Amino acid sequence: MSNAKLWGGRFAESTSEAVEAFSESVSFDARLWRQDIAGSKAHARMLGRVGVLKEADVSAICDGLDGIAADIESGNFVWDTALEDVHMNIESALTERIGEAGKRLHTGRSRNDQIATDVRLYVREAIDALCADIDRLAEALRALAEREADAIMPGFTHLQVAQPVTFGHHMLAWREQILRDRERFTDARRRANRCPLGSAALAGTVYPIDREWVAAELGFDGVTANSLDAVSDRDFAIDFVAAASQLMVHLSRWSEELILWSTPMFGFVQLPDRFCTGSSIMPQKKNPDVPELVRGKTARVTGDLMSLLMLMKGQPLAYNRDNQEDKEPLFDAHDTVSACVRLYAELVPALAVNRDICRAAAIEGYSTATDLADYLVRKGLAFRDAHHVVGSVVGQAVKQGIDLAAMPLATLRGYSEHIDEDVFEVLTVEGSVAARDHVGGTAPARVRAAARDAKR
């Protein structure tokens, strides 16, 4: 029985329809067509340079691949699941277009090193695009921090009011998180940017190939060092999705804060209407859908990471068909994290901060109690004694339902003779934040300076 598969010479019967449907990957790996064509053109040119292919064949191959690329771009290319994957679809179409020369393209390579190259190219491009999106988001946070550098709000620990900070300081904290994420992506890109082409199926090839030329042609920093590892390695994909997972965890934390801050109980911020939806039954509702969905999609991306880790955990060297399953979690993580970052880059500049409510919340929580303790320490009291004194003062303020700054001097002096009239300079929330005037501190002057430095 004849077999139409490009690899079918060994087989006496055709693949069953059920197996074809189960094992095809073109329904999702067709997404790699640009990378596949770029790798094939570089491979063909290299084979021409070393004398394995005639220049006429190289020209025909490259022209044919360009024509296929144009058809795919325009939507005129028909993908065939019977041809299994992106590679076989393109190679089959090439041979149909240019004849014998198309059959020579695969000389000196395997689908194993071909797909490893394609996915590395994809990850590299995904990282470059995502880093550009992160830069936009980082700039949005920087600009918001500068705008709200002196907007006082409560800082929290254990979700309890701790000390006053500025809204701008809080936004710069968010910015620090995603700058670390960017570093992780950059580091992942460096490791991914090695070219596997030339590793062939697992052992290399007998042809006089020039791997370094192909790597340079495709923009890689160099070639992979071991053919067995090169065709079976998916660490670079795991690195990417791990960095994406960490980024999503950061966005999820932001989402949690925005969801809380936008409730009537907090009222710290107003989310733009265009990022919210209403209720089908309660006409007053304004639901923070984008932050909620980002928080939810974090589970999806971290799940993609777990899928890749479990995919690789039991595989012996070298390539195994299991690795076909790397692409869907990779693509899903990329699509999800990119969409979330882009949405937040649009949402952040449009946040409306309710300054009066934020300041009132900082006052309500006795957030300057630590400032009073520090004041007593500067007056000569040991910190533990100062801590006890201030705890007693706060207890009295709670009973009276007043802020520390509203307590009479005589009452305060009843707790410590070290307290003088200058105490009120440290008991206001403005005085508290202004006093933290050092690198990394929440003082408005420091926040503005940090925002200016970040812009430079």
Image (tube, helix red, strand yellow):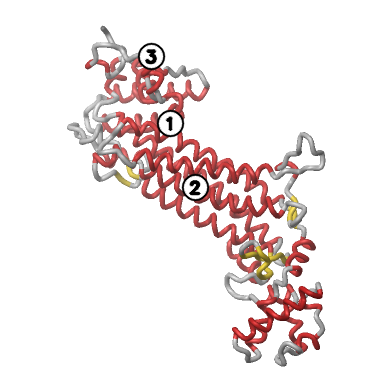
Quadrant location of the C terminus in the rendered image = bottom right
Up the image or down, 410 lies above or below 271; here it is: below
Q: Is residue 145 left or right of residue 124?
A: right
* Nearer mark to the viewer, of 1 and 3: 3
User: Which label sits on residue 216?
Assistant: none
Tag 2 residue: 245
Please name the residue shown 71% across and 55% down the image.
261
Quadrant of the image occupied by residue 386: bottom right
Tag 1 residue: 32
Residue reaching furthest to the top:
1
Residue type at numbered disc 2 = Ser
**Residue 217 percent across, percent down from the top left:** 35, 39
Please name the residue shown 63% across and 81% down the image.
387
Residue type at numbered disc 3 = Glu
Quadrant location of the N terminus in the rendered image = top left
Q: Secondary structure at mark 2?
A: helix
175 and 102: which is toward the camera: 175
Q: Are marks 2 and 1 in contact (CB under 8 Å)?
A: no
